[in-house]
Image (cartoon, rainbow, N blue to C red):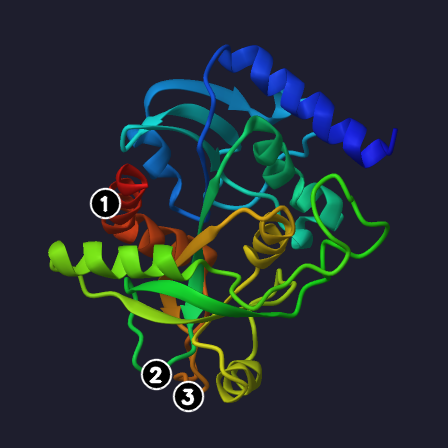
């Protein structure tokens, strides 16, 4: 057996042994400072990553490092309370491992979130941005021998973020009176924050927000034909006209994400209930 498949199967079998008859329909990936959505999941079974065979450990600020299986919006969900990043030194095979485990658990939709810098001049700290498309500056997780059990060698990425889910989010935001942005997310390797010149370049090539995650997981999900909805919390204004004493601070990013998590949780919860 392909060792990659063996790793996926062992992890999925372990999770299944812990959750009994629960059959997750929706996967959720919670980024920096956004893990408290996991606290809204009812009848929770919490599985620390360190207990799952073959799983790495999440080391990023604001990432608790748990799989949570339970009920949200009337559906059985499996949520990642913290993700894995390429900048932590993990190969892409491990960065996207949880998505493939979720696929084996039976999810039919994937919701992803992240904290991002707003390179769009109209974005402000605390804004929520629906991801309508992305620009990938990270290594592609599908490089190497194709996992044919999951999808084709050359998967289509014309609509990486599901248009019907985007429309649903916009409808719910309007009903709740929540202002919401929509834009293109760009991901680089990190872990250093970008320079002002890089922010300017990203804006010029069409990015609205920038981060260090999410896209590998989306590619893995689309490879496996899982519809994806993505949302960014704008946690800092990633511009190229800073004051001389300005600096990006990781703790401030987590605090800004935490402050916006309730609004994102409301939208995610209602969307999942509508599926």
Q: Which x, y percent locates residue 201?
A: 56, 86
- Mark seen at residue 241: 3
Question: Above or below — where is 189 with respect to 3?
Answer: below
* Viewer-side residue, 128 vs 235: 128
Q: CA distance from mark 1 to mark 2?
A: 26 Å
Looking at the image, is mark 1 or mark 2 earlier in the sequence?
Answer: 2
Q: Secondary structure at mark 2?
A: loop
Looking at the image, is mark 3 or mark 2 earlier in the sequence?
Answer: 2
* Residue at 28% in and 62% down: 126
For disc 2, the neighbor class at 10 Å (few under 14, some 14 to 19, many from 20) is few
Left or right: where 150 falls relative to 194? right
Number of numbered callouts drawn: 3
- The residue pinned by badge 2 equals 121
* Viewer-side residue, 194 vs 134: 134
Question: Above or below — where is 38 with respect to 178?
Answer: above
- The residue pinned by badge 1 equals 266
Of circles 3 and 1, which is in front? 1
Q: Which x, y percent locates residue 216?
A: 63, 55
* Viewer-side residue, 47 vs 267: 267
Looking at the image, is mark 3 or mark 1 earlier in the sequence?
Answer: 3
* Residue at 43% in and 84% down: 244
């Amino acid at each position: 057996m392909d060792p990659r498949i063996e790793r996926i199967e062992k992890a999925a079998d372990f999770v299944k042994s812990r959750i009994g008859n629960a059959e997750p329909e929706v996967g959720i990936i919670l980024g920096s400072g956004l893990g408290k959505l996991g606290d809204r999941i009812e009848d929770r079974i919490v599985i620390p990553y360190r207990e799952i065979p073959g799983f790495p450990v999440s080391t990023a600020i604001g990432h608790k490092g748990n799989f949570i299986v339970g009920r949200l919006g009337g559906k059985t969900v499996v949520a990642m309370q913290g993700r894995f990043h390429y900048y932590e030194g993990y190969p892409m095979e491990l960065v996207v491992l949880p998505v493939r485990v979720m696929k084996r658990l039976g999810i039919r939709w994937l919701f992803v979130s992240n904290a991002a810098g707003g390179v769009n001049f109209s974005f402000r700290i605390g804004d929520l941005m629906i991801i309508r498309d992305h620009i990938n500056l990270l290594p592609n997780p599908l490089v190497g021998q194709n996992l044919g059990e999951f999808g084709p060698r050359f998967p289509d990425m014309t609509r990486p973020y599901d248009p019907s889910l985007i429309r649903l989010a916009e409808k719910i935001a309007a009903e709740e009176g929540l202002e919401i942005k929509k834009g293109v997310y760009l991901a680089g390797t990190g872990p250093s924050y970008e320079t002002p010149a890089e922010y300017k370049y990203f804006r010029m090539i069409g990015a609205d927000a920038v981060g260090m995650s999410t896209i590998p997981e989306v590619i893995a999900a689309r490879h496996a034909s899982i519809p994806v909805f993505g949302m960014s919390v704008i946690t800092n204004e990633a511009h190229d006209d800073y004051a001389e004493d300005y600096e990006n601070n990781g703790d401030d990013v987590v605090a800004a994400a935490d402050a916006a998590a309730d609004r994102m949780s409301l939208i995610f919860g209602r969307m999942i209930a509508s599926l």
